[in-house]
Amino acid sequence: LFSAVEMAPRDPILGLNEQYNADTNPNKVNLGVGVYFDDNGKLPLLQCVQAAEKTMMDKPAARGYLPIDGLAAYDNAVKALVFGADSAVVQDGRVATVQALGGTGGLKIGADFLKKLNPNAKVLISDPSWENHRALFTNAGFTVETYAYYDADKLGVNFDGMLASLNAAEAGTVIVLHACCHNPTGYDITPEQWDKVVEVVKAKGLVAFLDMAYQGFGHGIAEDGAVIGKFVAAGLNFFVSTSFSKSFSLYGERVGALSVVCESKEEAARVLSQLKIVVRTNYSNPPTHGGTVVATVLNNPELRAQWEQELGEMRTRIKAMRQALVDGLKAAGVQRDMSFITKQIGMFSYSGLSKDQMVRLRNEFGVYGTDTGRMCVAALNSKNIGYVCESIAKVL
Ligand code: PLP
Ligand code: TYF
């Protein structure tokens, strides 16, 4: 039965973890996978999460099945977070939201629903993008192509190219957009540029699918969420996937969501019924723990304030590490102007290092980033930064 099964390639990012774990270099540093570590190099367990879990354990609940679309308190909290607590689309019942298995799960539910709705549509992802975007939409049956995004010479976004790609797309094309903290480049477009994207999406009849995996890691929860408001204000129907993996440091709990903005309450009910079929035929209904933790935090003013503070600390620490990286590289003798690192935002930095340099960093120094030159600055800390800077200086 399986004799002709081929060995599949490893995930280019998660595969690095295996290599890192097997590395015996005592100085090794993992800047490969996008995970936030604190200044002690530890994966944080947020105080707000611990407090929520304590209240949950004080009154342990039996574990019945959740509804197919997840906990209502969770879905409502997601809507408030993504669209704003008193946003008209939410109040009018125009948003269909389902709890999902992380942001990936939200993307996959949306992709499967879109495939049924519009089987011949093309999907455009940014060039470059999170590699799983391509894999996920391809596996959902779509032809996936790219829109222009990164400009290596300019060290920023090729915005004219991006607009030209979108303008050239056929009506109905699904455009996967990073709502904030672009993965892998770290370069976001400006609010004014978002206005132009919204204009083209509307004029050309494109279908926007906003991937919000890092809300709060850019400029703040509301600031990062403002992009969503622009699509709402334009009267568009669109998709938003949400991930709490990073913002709650709940990677392994798989907490995310998919929200679909519809024309009317009645339409949202029909869309929700279809999303529920996708969920039901894949995994029936979502797990209880992570969703309950996030709903508990988001729906309790004190815990919510604590979360905002902890998320703010993560955001601030990442920014401090960007500056420390720029300063450290200079101090280590790097001639090249590396100040672009502080213009990037979110967890990642596209360092501009070549594949050869990244391979040397890994093999000779135990410093792991992706072959594309992406480094997770959220894994830098006051202890490893000096070593990382010296290592980069040596390969440059
Ligand atoms: N989308 C992007 C752009 C990401 O970087 C990630 C990272 O994990 C995800 C989606 C997936 O999120 P999750 O881990 O919650 O599935
Ligand atoms: O880009 C990253 O590193 C994170 C984590 O298949 C990740 O988004 C990486 C690869 C993958 C799933 C998650």
Image: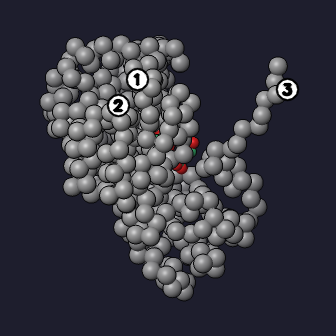
The percent position of residue 125, horizontal first and vertical second, equals 44, 44
Please tell me the numbered disc located at residue 367. Answer: none
Q: Amino acid at mark 3?
A: Ser
Q: Amino acid at mark 1?
A: Asn
Which secondary structure lies at badge 3? loop
Using a 10 Å C-alpha cutoff, classify the residue at mark 1 as few (fewer than 14 neighbours), some (14 to 19) or many (20 or more): few
What residue lies at 36% left-to-right and 13% top-to-bottom?
A: 273
* Quadrant hosting residue 319: bottom left
The residue at which mark 3 appears reads as: 3
The percent position of residue 39, horizontal first and vertical second, equals 49, 62
Which secondary structure lies at badge 1? loop
The residue at which mark 1 appears reads as: 118
Quadrant location of the C terminus in the rendered image: bottom right
- Of circles 1 and 3, the one toward us is 1
Q: Nearer the viewer, residue 371 or 329?
A: 371
Using a 10 Å C-alpha cutoff, classify the residue at mark 2 as few (fewer than 14 neighbours), some (14 to 19) or many (20 or more): some
The percent position of residue 261, horizontal first and vertical second, equals 27, 28
Task: Give the image's coloring scheme.
Answer: one colour
Does residue 34 appear left or right of residue 226 in this picture? right
* Quadrant hosting residue 392: bottom right
Q: Nearer the viewer, residue 343 or 390?
A: 343
